[in-house]
Image: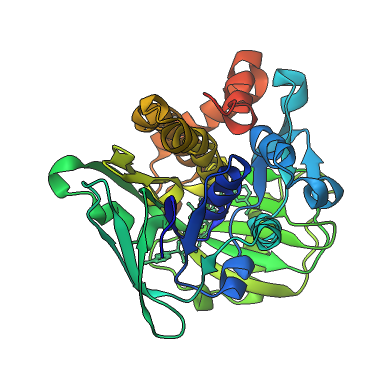
Amino acid sequence: MRTQVAIIGAGPAGLLLSHLLEAEGVDSVVVETRSRDYVESRIRAGILEQSTVDLLTDVGLGARLAAEGDRHRGIYLQWPHERQHLDFVDLIGRTVTVYGQTEVQKDLGRARDAAGQPIHYGVTGTALHDLDSEHPYVTFTDAEGTQQRLDADVVVGCDGSFGPSRAAVPEAARQTWQRAYPYSWLGILADVAPSTDELIYAWHPNGFALHSMRSSSVSRFYLQVPPETDAGMWSDGQIWDALAERLGHGEAGWQLTPGPITAKSVLPMHSFVQQPMRYCRLFLAGDAAHIVPPTGAKGLNLAVADVALLAPALVALLRRGDPGPAGAYSATALRRVWRCTHFSWWMTTMLHTGGAGADPFEAQLQLSQLRWVTSSEAGARGLAENYAGLPIGF
Ligand code: FAS
Ligand code: PHB
């Protein structure tokens, strides 16, 4: 097989990249190790920044998003006896939208079907070759067990944190940074109407909690848990008790409504950045190049921002023979990557407590930061700009 762009990974980065390239007459082939059902059903991100919503809308992927997405003006930050709302519209004139990554994935899949996009699901043994030549190629075994070779002009690694693309960059040519946080998130999905109109990020001495949602009848929650936690260690009753305790803020009249839990999973919290995001004919986008803790709701949005930058760069390279934008891709993308990495670290360290071994000094610093962010317009605007306001070209 031959194509202009070989894309490894059919997550949001890979499928959106193929969509953006095709709109500019550049063809691609996508190879994906999982099944389509798996990719479209795994529960991940839930919040789209306005720049993500605007981009998806501009490229014809906004119909269901407009009909089913839930636009929010802001978020609540909370600590015992205090719940404060940050209104992003008042602060910076931008909003965020609740629309699950599963739905983004389905919209992308349908759009790629309509375009006749070749996507090979269920592949194994993906390997990248001759990336430092003018004729790179990818080999893999397809779902029927046949060895395949895909020749391309460029290869884009959109294969997330466990794919082969990161390591395809020679060690001497890459630099990585990582930080493991001393806690994880226990994420649950529940068939119950949210007990809040907008997301609640709650600091609590016993651990952080987040009340998010997926629709008017499905809620999404996260609990800070020790890093080695297994989802099976928590009964439904223990989960609801911990959520009620940490999300309750002592104000009369508010209470958390429990309901049937339909999914539980533990998400480790860590940061990872690999640079450069280009090596010869290989480009990296999305989680393949960077991972952020989800406290700042950045993961999916950062993947979108990467491909929104990479697609025009590849069009310039492959359609107009202009290597400039592709040459600038890594440095430009990394500016936003590090901004989002810092913001995700800032939100994470502000809101996660030390649990049993908590450092009382650290707790006072966190509470002081929360009081400042929710009482100072300058502080609140800083959070709003990072959470909802970074333009695509940042
Ligand atoms: P993805 O990981 O989505 O896609 C990569 C694709 O490459 C996958 O489909 C994978 O199967 C495929 N692949 C891997 N190896 C391959 C190979 N050898 N050959 C072919 N294909 C291969 N972000 C948030 O903002 N909020 C959240 O709450 C949140 N929760 C998350 C929970 C989990 C369990 C995980 C892992 C991530 C979560 N994220 C969250 C981050 C997540 O949303 C990512 O940022 C987003 O999926 C990034 O998209 P991609 O870069 O496309 O990577
Ligand atoms: C989610 O709804 O999955 C979600 C929302 C906000 C976050 C992280 C996850 O910061």
The picture places residue 371, in percent across and down from the top left corner, at 60, 26
Q: Is residue 123 left or right of residue 117?
A: left
- Res 262 quadrant in image: bottom right
Q: Is residue 81 visible?
A: no
Q: Is residue 72 visible?
A: yes
Q: Is residue 169 left or right of residue 87?
A: left
The picture places residue 23, in percent across and down from the top left corner, at 63, 43
Q: Is residue 246 left or right of residue 97?
A: left
Residue at image coords 82%, 45% = 66
Q: Is residue 325 left or right of residue 79?
A: left
- Res 105 quadrant in image: bottom right
Seen in the picture, residue 22 relative to 103 is either above or below; the reply is: above
Seen in the picture, residue 219 relative to 333 is either above or below; the reply is: below
Image quarter hosting the N terminus: bottom left
> Is residue 104 or residue 272 the one in the foreground?
104
Residue at image coords 63%, 69% = 41
The picture places residue 112, in percent across and down from the top left corner, at 64, 58
